[in-house]
Image: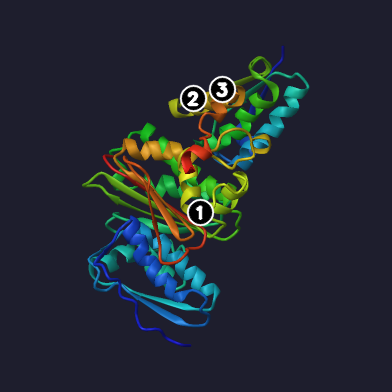
């Protein structure tokens, strides 16, 4: 099947992918392809900085809304050769699919501040 | 314009810790609710002030100027030259972000003022001024990437939670011989308590508890709207611990300092505007 290649830097008009807002912008773009069952390659070529805030807003939200199987079958990530970035993308995916992991850090308030 | 007697700190050193912030807050308390007056902060007898705290002084000056007050900061000796090199002196003279400030010794990290949505300039600041610094040459690329990520997360946290369009003040200091890095980011937004109080249905009702709640990994993030995640302060705290350092957060009149041991909290003489996040990293 034909795959569309998207450049993150073009979607967010920046080489710096650090903000939640930029992540949500990228999410909205990819979401349209996912809704039309179009496979996409999301390339991080040209991106100089990537944060968890960006990854969680884009990748985490995609996995949270559409599920692991659906996103894995439609979206591929390319040009991520930096180990810190790979870790962020993995974490964003887990946060998106695993509700227990997502809430693991939510401490019991009554225990903490009793 | 009424002129107040100079405030002279009761200590000879102001560092990035609870006592340091308490000292600064004692001065700030004298300025609260005053308009059109002149205040003088006399540091000329001080042996040392952490240069990263220039961001706190700049934010105090900004707040005072909003009330048509004037702030005079007297510095002397080595402290004067450090604050000259990092740009605080020219900021005090009304020239914020004067890039012509020469640091011929390349030993300081400049004071910069950002809007909360200036992702690219903030990242450039980190790359050029922090990690392009000669004190950072021993850091690996992976380490620099992690540090830039953590600092960016703090900056993003401000944008997400501070609910402000007012400036954000950043400054740092490297101590290459000790492998120590200090970073201070000041915002003039809502502080921690407001959103945490709402999120917890009123169970958390003090700034110190709200800071602790965030440091333990909790988040006020609206997951459905913004995606999963949040709780970045916990991972940054872990990172600081690994580097024998600490994260100190000031919100309102409370502060919490999280290092290797339990979180310590304390009271300041008066509330600061917004929040102040400080990172101290060692063994770099």
Chain of the residue displaying label 3: A
Q: Residue at x 64, y 30 (%)?
A: A61
Residue B53 position within the rendered picture, expressed as x and y whole percent measured from the top left: 37, 60
Q: Residues within 10 Å of mark 1 (few under 14, many from 20)?
A: some
Instruction: Tell me the SS state at disc 1.
Output: loop
A45 over B94 or under it: above or below: above
Outermost residue on the right side: it is A36
**Residue at numbered disc 2:** A86
Instruction: Tell me the SS state at disc 3.
Output: strand
- Closer to the eye: label 3 or 2: 2
**Residue at numbered disc 1:** B206
Q: Residues within 10 Å of mark 2 (few under 14, many from 20)?
A: few
Q: Is residue B257 left or right of residue A104?
A: left
Residue closer to the observer: A82 or B3: B3
Q: Which mark is residue A78?
A: 3
Outermost residue on the bottom side: it is B1
């Amino acid at each position: 099947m034909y795959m569309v290649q998207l450049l993150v830097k073009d979607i967010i008009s920046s080489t710096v992918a650090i903000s939640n807002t930029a992540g949500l912008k990228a999410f909205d773009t990819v979401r349209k392809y996912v809704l039309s069952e179009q496979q996409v390659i999301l390339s991080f070529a040209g991106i100089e900085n990537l944060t968890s805030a960006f990854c969680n807003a884009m990748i985490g939200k995609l996995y949270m809304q559409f599920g692991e199987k659906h996103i894995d079958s439609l979206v591929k990530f390319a040009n991520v050769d930096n180990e810190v970035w790979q870790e962020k993308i993995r974490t964003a995916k887990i946060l998106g699919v695993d509700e227990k992991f997502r809430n693991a850090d939510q401490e019991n308030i009554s225990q903490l501040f009793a | 314009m009424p002129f107040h007697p100079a405030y002279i700190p009761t200590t000879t050193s102001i560092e990035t810790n609870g006592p340091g912030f308490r000292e600064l807050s004692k001065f700030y308390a004298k300025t609260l609710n005053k308009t059109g007056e002149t205040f003088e902060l006399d540091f000329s007898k001080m042996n040392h002030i952490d240069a990263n705290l220039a961001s706190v002084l700049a934010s105090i000056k900004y707040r005072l100027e909003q009330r048509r007050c004037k702030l005079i900061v007297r510095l002397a000796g080595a402290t004067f030259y450090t604050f000259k090199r990092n740009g605080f002196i020219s900021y005090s003279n009304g020239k914020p972000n004067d890039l012509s400030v020469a640091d011929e010794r390349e030993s300081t990290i400049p004071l910069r003022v950002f809007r909360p949505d200036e992702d690219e300039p903030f990242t450039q600041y980190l790359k050029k001024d922090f990690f392009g610094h000669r004190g950072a040459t021993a850091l690996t690329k992976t380490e620099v990437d992690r540090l830039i990520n953590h600092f960016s997360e703090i900056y993003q946290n401000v944008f997400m939670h501070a609910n402000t369009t007012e400036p954000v003040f950043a400054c740092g200091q490297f101590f290459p011989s000790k492998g120590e890095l200090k970073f201070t980011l000041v915002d003039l937004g809502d502080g921690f308590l407001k959103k945490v109080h709402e999120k917890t249905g009123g169970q958390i009702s003090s700034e110190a508890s709200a800071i602790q709640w965030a440091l333990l990994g909790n988040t006020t993030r609206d997951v459905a709207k913004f995606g999963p995640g949040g709780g970045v302060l916990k991972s940054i705290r872990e990172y600081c611990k690994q580097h024998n350092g600490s994260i100190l957060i000031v919100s309102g009149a409370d502060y919490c300092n999280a290092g290797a041991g339990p979180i310590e909290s304390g009271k300041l003489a008066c509330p600061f505007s917004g929040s102040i996040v400080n990172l101290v990293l060692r063994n770099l």
